[in-house]
Amino acid sequence: MADLECSKYTATSALPATAAAAASGGAGGGDGAAAAGGAACASVLRESAWLRPSGANDTRGAWLAMSLARDAYPKMHLTPDGAPMTDTPALKCAWAAKLSRMGAQNVTFLSSALVNAAVARAGRNVFVVIRGTDSEAEEENNGLWAADEALLWYRLVRVHGGFLSTSRHALPALVGLLQEAFGQVRAEAGQQQQQQQQQQQSGPANASAAGASGAASGAPEPRLYLMGHSRGGGLATVMAAQLDSGHYITVGRYIAGVYTFGAPKVGNKKFVQGYAWRLGKITYAWW
C-alpha cells in the first residue's frame, strides 16, 4: 500500500461498534475480553475453519463473505467527519486497513471503469472481493444481456454479454495479482519449513516437535475464494468459470469457494450444467 501513501489519510472503515472496540483493544483501557476480541478479529481471514463450506447452510462462511462483499462499496467507509467516501485512493487505503485488521497480510486492487475488486491474502487464503454496481458505466454493462458464446469445459456455452466481456478484459490483470499472492503463500510456507529444519538441527527435542509440526502441516497450497454482491456476484461466477477452464486452470485449480449475494443469472442451460459439474459443490448463492 506504500504506492497509495496511505499514511496521509486518516479515514477509517466503518466497523460494528463491538468489532471496532475489539480491534483497538477496547475503550477506556481495554479489558481482557476486548483484547481477546481484537486478537480474534485480527485472525478471522486466516482461520481455516471460516471457509470450509459444509453445505447450503454454511452460515459462518456466508457471514464472512457477506461482510467482505459489503465493504467493497465506497459508502461503507467513512471520512473523518463521518461522511461516506467516494471512489478515491483514500477509499482503497480505508478498505485495505479494514482487511488488515481482519488478518490480511497483503492487499492489492484491480480497478477499471467496469471492475473494482480487492485481492487480499491471509495465510494461505486468497480472497477476490468484487464490488457490485456503483457507476453509470456498470449499469450500462449490466444491461448488455444479449448472450455471447464462450468455450468453457470443452463445450460452447452462452454467457451474459456484458459480464463475459468485462471478465475477459479483467482476467489477465487479475491472474497476475493472484499469481503474486500464490507466490507469497509459497514463500511463507518455505520460510516456515526452513525454520523447522533449523529446529531439527538444534537438538533432538526440537527436532521431534518440528517433525511433528511439519508432518501435520505439509506444504500448504493456496485456497482461492471469489465473492461479490449483485453485479459483483455475477462477475465472481463468470470469472470462476473462466479460471476453471482453459489456460487459466493453473490458477483456477485453487478455487475453494464462490460466494454470491443477490447475483443475477449469468448463463444458459449448458453453462449451468458445466458450472454445476465443476464448481457447484463449492458455490454458495444467497438471494
Image: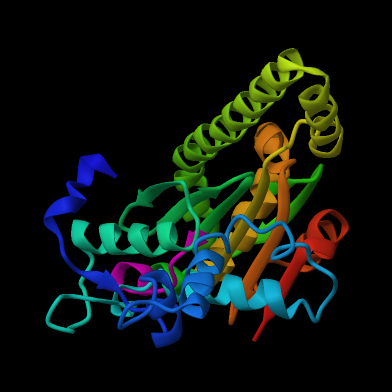
| Rendered position, 77 above or below 177 | below
Residue drawn at 69 percent across, 42 percent down: 252
| Residue 214 seen in the figure | yes
156 up-or-down from 216: above or below: below
Quadrant assignment for the N terminus: top left
| In this rendering, position of residue 73 left or right of residue 67 | left
Q: Is residue 185 above or below residue 237?
A: above
Q: Is residue 138 magenta?
A: yes
- Identify whether 53 is placed above or below 179: below
Q: Residue furthest top?
A: 201
Q: Residue at x 62, y 78 (%)?
A: 63
Q: Nearer the viewer, residue 194 or 27?
A: 27
Residue 286 location in percent, x, y?
A: 67, 82
Query: Between residues 203 and 247, which one lies in front from this camera angle?
Result: 203
Q: Nearer the viewer, residue 266 or 280?
A: 280
In which quadrant is the C terminus drawn?
bottom right
Which stretch appears magenta?
A: 129-140
Q: Is residue 31 magenta?
A: no
Q: Nearer the viewer, residue 70 or 80?
A: 80
Q: Quadrant of residue 277?
A: bottom right
> Is residue 145 in sight in this rendering?
no
Where is residue 108 shown, x and y percent of the image?
Answer: 39, 46
